[in-house]
Image: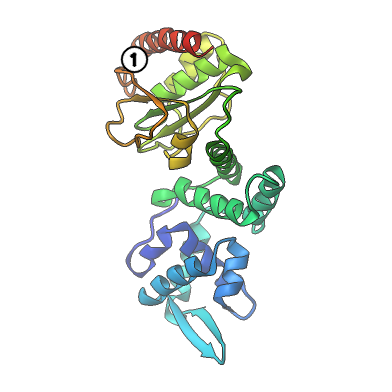
């Protein structure tokens, strides 16, 4: 687990600001301009300017104007602390985000502009890395791809084809994962299935993996994901499970609220009962959809 930044380094809990500082520190001259940072990270210059100003205000960076160019460097008295933070931070291939953005731009060519793709890649890293959590690039790429597909679908709103169901619970580590895995198994390509959480956990509960495996359902490499607007906009049916008012209500969607016990901390025989309850509900929903 990465130690949380504190004091003057607290701003580095933001993944974009940590990335900015990392790029500056790795530069041979130890400095960078806003335009260079925007290109390297794949976000707009105004976004970088906002983060750079915050880092200057936190007395982590210095601002050094030279004619039309403004260079940013790490304050000398902060170098040792920054180096310690970067040494403890999760390692990521320096080209990972850029490569993911390029690959997804090819995947969504003709549907979504490359600049939008780059924004969603960066934002997906940030959402998954909330509270200083380690972010695996493969997970960020998958999350960004799901969000972009939802964005494209929401904009296109096809009148035919597979209906889309979004399952939402609090942590996206139990009930919603159970429902999504069971529906995917039963429906195959006939239904698009997504899951999200209003306060996502770090990983899917081991008990969920166990009770699904018992009935021949694999959860593969699923992981908790934050709830985003484009996921709701893309859905035809939104099924909520104990997440209160966290899910936005949009016109033209069908909303179902399933009252289910939370499997967190329960013995396996109770988790199995929750699984069977969800299984019956999923089968009924599938019959209605198809």
Toward the left, the furthest residue is 244
- In the image, residue 240 sits, relative to residue 212, either above or below, namely below
Toward the front, the furthest residue is 159
> What SS does tag 1 mark?
loop
**Considering depth in this image, is 242 or 201 the residue closer to the camera?**
242
Number of numbered discs present?
1
Mark 1, Cα crowd under 10 Å, few <14 / some 14-19 / many 20+, is few
- In the image, residue 91 sits, relative to residue 260, either above or below, namely below
Asked if residue 75 shows in the view, the reply is no
Toward the bottom, the furthest residue is 67
- Is residue 268 found left or right of 109 in the rendered image? left
Give the percent coordinates (x, y) of residue 290: 54, 11
Asked if residue 209 shows in the view, the reply is yes
Give the percent coordinates (x, y) of residue 284: 44, 8
- Is residue 172 found left or right of 30 in the rendered image? left
Give the percent coordinates (x, y) of residue 36: 61, 72
Residue underneath mark 1: 267
The residue sitting at 50% across, 12% down in the picture is 286
- How is this picture coloured? rainbow
Give the percent coordinates (x, y) of residue 77: 42, 80
The residue sitting at 47% across, 83% down in the picture is 63
- Is residue 102 found left or right of 270 in the rendered image? right
- Is residue 223 found left or right of 36 in the rendered image? left
**Considering depth in this image, is 72 or 283 the residue closer to the camera?**
283
């Amino acid at each position: 687990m990465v130690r949380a930044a504190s004091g003057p380094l607290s701003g580095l809990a933001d993944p974009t600001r940590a990335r900015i500082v990392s790029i500056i520190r790795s530069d041979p001259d130890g400095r960078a301009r806003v335009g260079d940072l925007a290109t390297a990270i794949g976000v707009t210059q105004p976004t970088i300017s906002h983060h750079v100003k915050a880092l200057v205000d936190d007395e982590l960076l210095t601002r050094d104007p030279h004619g039309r160019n403004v260079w940013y460097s790490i304050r000398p008295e902060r170098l040792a602390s920054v180096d310690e933070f970067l040494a403890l931070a999760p390692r990521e291939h320096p080209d990972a985000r850029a490569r993911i953005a390029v690959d997804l731009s090819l995947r969504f060519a003709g549907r979504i502009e490359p600049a939008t793709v780059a924004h969603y890649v960066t934002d997906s890293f940030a959402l998954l890395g909330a509270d200083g959590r380690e972010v695996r690039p493969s997970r960020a790429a998958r999350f960004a791809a799901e969000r972009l597909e939802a964005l494209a679908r929401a904009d296109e709103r096809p009148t035919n084809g597979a209906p889309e169901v979004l399952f939402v619970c609090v942590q996206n580590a139990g009930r919603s994962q159970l429902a999504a895995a069971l529906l995917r198994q039963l429906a195959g390509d006939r239904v698009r299935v997504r899951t999200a959480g209003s306060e996502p956990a770090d990983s899917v509960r081991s008990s969920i993996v166990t009770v699904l495996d018992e009935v021949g359902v694999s959860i593969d490499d699923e992981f908790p994901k934050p709830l985003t607007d484009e996921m709701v906009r893309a859905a035809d049916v939104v099924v909520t499970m104990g997440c209160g008012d966290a899910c936005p209500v949009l016109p033209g969607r069908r909303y179902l609220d399933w009252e289910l016990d939370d499997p967190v901390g329960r013995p396996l025989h109770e988790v199995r009962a929750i699984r069977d309850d969800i299984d019956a509900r999923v089968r009924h929903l599938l019959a209605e959809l198809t």
